Image: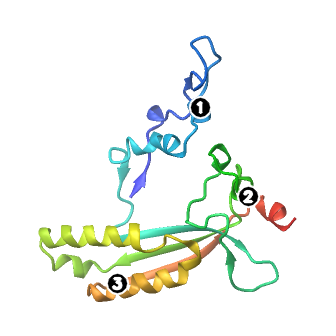
Amino acid sequence: MEFRQPTEKLSLYRLVTPPNGDATSTKIPWLEAQNSQNGLYDWFRSDLAADSQPVAENILAIFVQPVWPMPGKDTGADTSAAPNYLYDTRRHQWPDTTTMAERSRHQLPPMIRLTLVALDERDWSKLDSTATDALATQLRTLANTKVFITAAEYENDVKKLESELVNLNLGFRVFSTAVQIPAAKLMSSREN
């Protein structure tokens, strides 16, 4: 699914009264007035169903993991800036005193690892609607709560997911690649 909010509904930059201000205060963009992570994400959560459309079928999940190459090593990646797969360039706005907030402040990671899990259409077409709904709920729970919770467990999570799909007698393929982001400026600050 892809969330694509129409321009006329985009409200990130509408002017609002600051949280601690009064009616005479200079208005600021809504985006800057947010003081909680959940509050900031409300802009798309409220219209998620209405403004989403399918991009591809039979995709169980796509996992996006920000990583830093490990200097002097051919393999491996540093996942410490997003240990739970959450990379937020506005983390500095939340009550977060870790170094992750400064490492990610308004900056893209130098690389992201993409893992896509595609299911076989033939396995779904054999099921009736009740069985399809039950299996979809089971797979959603698996993808959202049992795997890819901690970045350090990435390799084990891929194996665990594959094992669960085999146990459910589902055909699948797991695709994974790393994509460099040339515009990321973190590399120089990371190496200092």
Measured in 3D between alpha carbons, the distance from the residue under mark 3 to the one under mark 2, in whole angstroms, is 36 Å
Amino acid marked by disc 1 = Ala
Of residue 184 and residue 153, the one placed in the foreground of this image is 153
Going 64% across and 50% down the picture, which residue do you hit? 91
Relative image position of residue 68 (x, y in whole percent) = 71, 71
Badge 3: residue crowd in 10 Å (few <14, some 14–19, many ≥20): some
Relative image position of residue 41 (x, y in whole percent) = 49, 45
Going 78% across and 58% down the picture, which residue do you hit? 185
Amino acid marked by disc 2 = Thr
Q: Residue 21 falls in which quadrant of the image?
A: top right
Of residue 175 and residue 26, the one placed in the foreground of this image is 26
Badge 1: residue crowd in 10 Å (few <14, some 14–19, many ≥20): some
In the image: residue 183, left or right of residue 28 = right
Q: Mark 3 touching mark 2, by CB under 8 A?
A: no
Above or below, 51 against 53 in this view is above
Task: Indicate the secondary structure of the residue bearing disc 3.
Answer: helix
Amino acid marked by disc 3 = Glu
Residue 4, which numbered label?
none
Going 33% across and 44% down the picture, which residue do you hit? 50
Q: Which residue is mark 1?
A: 33
Q: Quadrant of the C terminus?
A: bottom right
Q: Which residue is mark 2?
A: 99
Residue that sits furthest to the top in the current view: 24
Above or below, 7 against 100 in this view is above
Mark 2 vs 1, N-terminal side? 1
Q: Which residue is mark 3?
A: 164
Mark 3 vs 2, N-terminal side? 2
Mark 3 vs 1, N-terminal side? 1
Relative image position of residue 36 (x, y in whole percent) = 55, 41
